[in-house]
Image: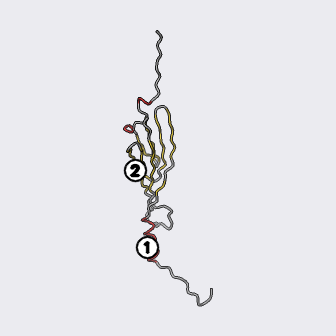
């Protein structure tokens, strides 16, 4: 660098414009899940950090289970964000339900950013013991 080189000045309006564009972008994440199956049905555990009940939607439509959620990452008072990879993550995941499962009896519970879904089997799809008689 020599004396005649001008240093570039920071254009604050361009920085603000870029930050607005980034905050408008929505990133969709696939939440990790654990699925356990037994003779009674399926239990699904989904990790949804930062998600509250009012920002969580679970639907069943045409034999598919849909999970959608939006997390809120609050900024503590008196601080401002200098860098954030994801400001408001959006979670989405879909599963196909087999005919053995009773979608009308799905139970969902959210606690500490972890959702537990219990999907029972239809009564007629559950294994049952058949007693054999002798004549």
87 and 31: which is toward the camera: 31
Q: Looking at the picture, does residue 105 appear above or below residue 91? A: above
The image position of residue 52, as x and y in percent, is: 41, 51
Q: Looking at the picture, does residue 85 appear above or below residue 8? A: above
133 and 89: which is toward the camera: 133
* Secondary structure of residue under mark 2: strand
Q: Residue 17: give its label.
A: 1
Q: Looking at the picture, does residue 122 appear above or below residue 132? A: below
> Within 10 angstroms of label 2, few (less than 14), some, or many (20 or more) residues?
some
Residue at point 37% right, 38% down?
104
The image position of residue 21, as x and y in percent, is: 43, 69
The image position of residue 102, as x and y in percent, is: 40, 36
Q: Tell me which numbered mark, 1 or 2, is placed earlier along the sequence.
A: 1
Q: Looking at the picture, does residue 112 appear above or below residue 124? A: below
54 and 46: which is toward the camera: 46
Q: Which residue is mark 2?
A: 56
> Within 10 angstroms of label 1, few (less than 14), some, or many (20 or more) residues?
few
The image position of residue 4, as x and y in percent, is: 59, 90
92 and 74: which is toward the camera: 92
Q: Quadrant of the N terminus?
A: bottom right
Which residue appears farthest toward the right when viewing the image? Answer: 1
Corner quadrant of residue 17: bottom left
* Secondary structure of residue under mark 1: helix
- Mark 1 and mark 2: Cα distance apart in space: 31 Å
């Amino acid at each position: 660098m020599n004396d005649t080189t001008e240093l570039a000045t920071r254009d604050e309006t361009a920085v603000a414009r870029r930050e607005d564009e980034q905050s408008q972008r929505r990133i969709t994440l696939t939440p990790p899940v654990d699925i356990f199956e037994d003779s009674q049905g399926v239990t699904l555990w989904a990790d949804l950090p930062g998600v509250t009940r009012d920002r969580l939607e679970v639907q069943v439509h045409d034999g598919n289970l849909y999970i959608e959620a939006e997390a809120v990452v609050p900024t503590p008072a008196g601080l401002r964000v200098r860098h954030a990879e994801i400001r408001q993550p959006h979670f989405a995941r879909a599963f196909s339900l087999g005919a053995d499962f009773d979608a009308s009896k799905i139970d969902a519970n959210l606690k500490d950013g972890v959702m537990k879904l219990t999907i029972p089997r239809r009564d007629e799809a559950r294994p049952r013991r058949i007693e054999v008689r002798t004549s």
